[in-house]
Image (tube, rainbow, N blue to C red):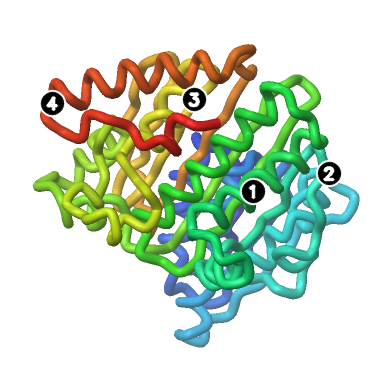
Amino acid sequence: MVVRLPNSFKPESLSTLEERLSKSQFIDNVNVNFDPLEWSYPMAMLVAGSYFRRWIEIRRSNNLSTTHTGISEKRNAHIYLMHLGFFDFAGMHHVGRKVGAANGTTRFLPIRKITLTELNKSVEDTGEELIDAIKFLSDSMARVLSGNSLGETTKVFQYSIREIIRNVLEHSGSEQCFMCAQKWTSGQSEIAIVDEGCGIHKSLSLAYSVQQNEALQFAIKPGVTRTDKFTDEENIHNNSGFGLYVLSELGSSFGWFCVGSGTKKLTYKKQNMTLENLPFSGTFVGVHLNSHPKNFEGVLKDIIHVGEKESEKEGRLSAASELSKTI
């Protein structure tokens, strides 16, 4: 049996990839043909890699034969994936660079594994708090992607990377996550993260009574956090339920925002939400900006203000944390 990849890793092609892998999961002698693949976006690449990781792991545990064809060092998309560590992340460890081996540039941040062990080690070394370690990591990655500029683009990257990491660490229950980013010469950019933890619905169920098919819409509302009943000592990430909300509004206004977990994928674009079926064990988040705010501080302030009013009206935490308000 041959599994042909779609012509690109993009949000719209993920369901096709998942269906093809699912149908071939327990069939022996499967060949994965990468020849059709001509383009890749960060979020879809991470989700595709996570699908492959699980698919390959299950096949190996059942002693099923798997081969691949069509990977070429003469194809730009394939070279890109090899350089960023995609194949290593996906479980094809003999192809391309290892995850974390490549350095980032002003065009991209390669796939990077972020672990609580790494962050806690930073805490031990500096004597600071966990959130300080997350902020330092986020700022360093943002500076690489923006070329050490101190302009508005850097502020957007710093805030987005920080909040996307904080959100995953809050909801996943996992010790690790993977992220990457891309910046195009057109001015567009995309930041993405994926974890293979418990998922958003299970996480939010600790604090709210929410149905699985409503979990994603609920998760991006302001003031929604599983730490709702936590004490200050328990809320180690200083979450107030505004980070994911801000990212979703930022993406919707300047490009698109996408989150997937459990059985659904939610896309938010131009203030319109689309909910589609897409199985995923864990959580993925992507923020794609077609352009960057010229005054990010003002945009952030407006988003927070509207969110606090909505959260108060609906009876949730009505104040964003100082960190969620800070660039």
Q: Which residue is mark 4?
A: 314
Q: CA distance from mark 1 to mark 2?
A: 18 Å
| Tag 4: amino acid | Glu
Q: Earlier in the sequence, mark 4 or mark 1?
A: 1
Task: Say which of marks 3 and 4 sits in front.
Answer: 4
Number of numbered tags placed on the structure image: 4
- For label 1, the SS is strand
In the image, which disc is placed on residue 180? 1
**Cα distance in 3D space between marks 3 and 4:** 23 Å
**For discs 1 and 2, the disc positioned in front in the rendered view:** 1
Q: What residue is at 63 percent from the left and 51 percent from the top?
A: 136
Q: Amino acid at mark 1?
A: Cys
Q: Residue 251 bears which disc, if any?
A: 3
Residue 179 in the image: x percent, y percent? 59, 52
Q: Work out how far the residue at label 2 is from the one at label 3, CA to CA, in angstroms.
A: 28 Å
Give the residue at x 37% y 22%.
Answer: 304
- Left or right of 9 in this view: 141: right
Quarter placement of the N terminus = bottom right
Q: Earlier in the sequence, mark 2 or mark 3?
A: 2
Q: Which residue corresponds to mark 2?
A: 76
Tag in front: 2 or 4 = 4
Q: Secondary structure at mark 2?
A: helix
Which mark is in front, 2 or 3?
Answer: 3
Density class for disc 2 (Cα within 10 Å; few <14, some 14-19, many ≥20) is few
- Are the two marked residues, 4 and 1, in contact with CB atoms closer than 8 angstroms? no
Most distant residue in the front direction: 127
Q: Earlier in the sequence, mark 2 or mark 4?
A: 2
- Discs 3, 4 touching: Cβ within 8 Å: no
